[in-house]
Image: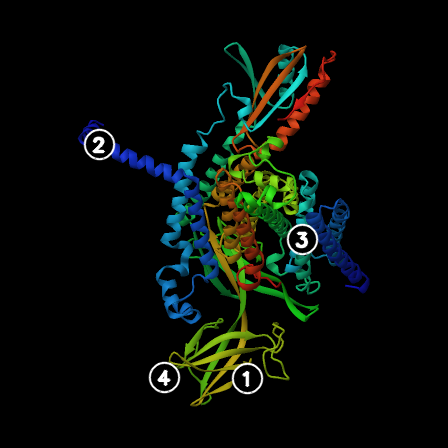
Amino acid sequence: MDPTRQMIDQGLLVVGIAAYVTAALLLFGYFLLRSAAMRTIGIPLAILGCLAQFAELGARWWMTGVWPLTNLYGSLSLFSAVAVAIFLIFAFRYDLAFAGGPVLAIAAVALGYATTWNEGYMPAVPALQSYWIKIHVPIVITAYASFMVAFCVALVFLLKAYAEQRYATRPPNVRGVAATPGGPAVDLTVSAYAARPALGMPRGLRNDTPATAQAAAAGDAFAQWLDGLPTLARLDVMQYRIVAVGLPLLSLGIITGAMWAKEAWGAYWQWDPKETAALISWIVYAAYMHLHTRPEWRGVKTAWVGVLGFASIVFCYLGVNIWISGLHSYKM
Amino acid sequence: MAESRAARAAVPAGARNGALRAWDDAVRLFAHVPFGVSLLAVWAFLTLIGVVIEQGRDPSFYAGAYAPPIARLIVRLDLDNIYHSPAYIIVLGLIICSMAAATFTKVIPRRIPRLNPVKIDAIPLHATLRVPGEADAVRERVGAFFAERGWQVRKRAFGGTEWTFADKSNWARRGVLIAHVGFVLIAAGTTIYWAKGYSGQFAVLSGQTATIPQSGTKVDLERFGYRIDPVRTKAGVVYQPIDYVSDVKVTGADGAARQAVIRVNHPYDANGTLIYQSTYGFAIDFRLTKNGAPVAGPDHPLKEGEGFTVDGTARSIQYQRFVGTIDRATGMPGADPRPNDPGVIIVAYDGNRPIGQALMPLGRPIDLGAGYRLEAARYVLYSGFQYRYDPGIPVVGIGAFVLLAGLCISLYWVPARLFVLVRDAGAGASEVGLAATTVKGYDVFEDRFAELVDALRRGTERSDPRPVQGAPHASPV
């Protein structure tokens, strides 16, 4: 490839990484400080990084004629770009900007790590010379990216749930009035829910504790910060909705992978480490969906299952590719 | 029939009740979601073992790779072939039982509440609107509002009070049932393969013929070609395989011969048995002499891993691997796998004990001692094929898409019911109380309910041109 084209490629890559890192810092700032300005700058930067990445992948394809997802560099690039795209869609639809920090940070790390696998431009090995690569890989990567965004929401959920639990379990003399000597008195008998809209307060998620709201009203800065996050019920629904994007895609990815495997290797299922690791992830998220039907499991427990699910995705995506050899061990 | 009745009568009623109770307990246990999820966890764990421990190797491999107690455990517990072990199959069977129990006792009978009056304020998703107009007119408008948005509206009177009920996506309750049916179909398709299918692999040298034993199909390899290109990367030159192609003549059981080209991702269908390009290699024609005179050596070109015993000795020679290019400077295997200056690596054994290995260039004999000389005379390309006949594939395919459809239905459509009560609020206005319930809890419907309430408020305000006495009040409580 000529130097001009290589420069375009590298330039877009640098723009992508720089935009992600800056957006991650700004959105972490928004998360911590609730500064609307940080959000106002962070979101467009995330959009810029995402566009630069898609442009870089497109340019690679256009300039080399080789589908860019035949190695770990290409797939990790797509992973971070799609994760940011999914985050942006949910940010606009469900006001998810507070989770942007971790999403953008992971996207930046994934893209940075991807560059270490960038060997240049190589034609695909025979097993990858199939139209299925244009169907199967993007679907699977989009599923992984969804789970990454869901994981970030689960982290916020767990942070809030455990922090609220601390307020709820503090002895009465250290919460509310006593937490802020000299502050206004707080009526501990009044439920914080009384002042909130009653839409959606299921049994399983009633750990938005009155204690946090009371401590916030009494001037506790951390409680005020915590109280500004979406309710646990809402965080749980967001995680559920994002997993609901990822699980059908993962299922479709496994199905298209099986169809491709039948064409390439003769059997739709060969118990290859990659296949079985994907199956494990599928089982974990299927378990998540089943547990989510139970009010007593919905909330902290399902959030942890979501974390476990993403750990299984990381193992399936990177662990198997790098450490375990099998039919999916192409030149990375 | 009469016999069975008599037999039933002979069973004491207490025992029958006990058996029925045990059956009910078992069904309840299997239908319990946490139990089903526990089975999924066990399934995931067993599958993970199969990922971490390499499957289908000889016991000697595990003895070499793991500490002796762990190696013994792996072999004895079938962890080396876990996906076909009894434990794995039993867990899958239990999962299917669990799905069946949950489907028939929970999923199918699951109903959203009946069309009965409810205490609206007691339902978490509820709202009250004050809208202008008489109660009957408002009721009509509210009914029309929901009907326009695709809700199935029904009205019922209870003790002189008229209730409006609106349902949406009620059919989607069957999504979970459909997903479970898909899973069972996949299991059924897999079972069909185990019962009736077959698979295998074979390697055939250029110009020779191989036969698939189960179908009698003959495969003549007329020519095998490969393409490996040097590609310059950041790390240096890499030799990248680009294509493997086998030109074959396939003769079916009916005797009809057909020319075919088989390459990776392009299998050949021989009357339902699919033949796939799998591997290739270089078979070597070894020639053995003793004191210059030919002696009995291998009677056919050897493929990688094959060997022969030197007649009259305890020694044997194994052809380990082909070297495309011997680096002239170092005399060691070069990076280029293409046969430019080829050679082979052989390993010599005394009994089962390896006594040495050597890289021998093609066409140049080496001395084995005791007057024996071995020459790798020439290489012959061979092509490796896999074949498979799987009559279960259509069932598995249908099952996969049914599973996916069920997943999508159950995840993206929320069966919901609205309970609406319109009451006269005096002063020419009415109070509309509405509550929503779904089969998936309330949180998941919260946004849509809020949007619906908002739209209803705007819709009812707009559609009544009469002057309003007092400010309209909408309060999603």
Q: If you read the primary sequence from the N terminus, does the residue marked by circle 4 or circle 1 appear first?
A: 4
Residue beneath label 1, please? B364
Judge depth for marks 4 and 3 and give the one in front.
3
Tell me which amino acid carries mark 2: Gly
A229 left or right of B185 in image: right
The image quadrant of residue A168 is top right
Task: Residue B312: give its label.
Answer: 4
Tell me if residue B67 comes above or below residue A61 in the rendering: below
SS under mark 1: loop
Task: Residue B14: give its label.
Answer: 2
Q: If you read the primary sequence from the N terminus, does the residue marked by circle 2 or circle 1 appear first?
A: 2
Q: Which quadrant is the C terminus of chain B positioned in?
A: top right
Which chain is indicated by disc 3?
Answer: A
Which is more toward the observer, B435 or A70?
B435
Which is more toward the observer, B361 or B151?
B151
What is the CA distance from the residue labelled 4 to the residue labelled 3? Answer: 65 Å
Judge depth for marks 3 and 1 and give the one in front.
3
Residue beneath label 3, please? A80
What is the CA distance from the residue labelled 4 to the residue labelled 1? Answer: 24 Å
Tell me if residue A131 comes above or below residue B384 in the rendering: above
Res B456 visible: no
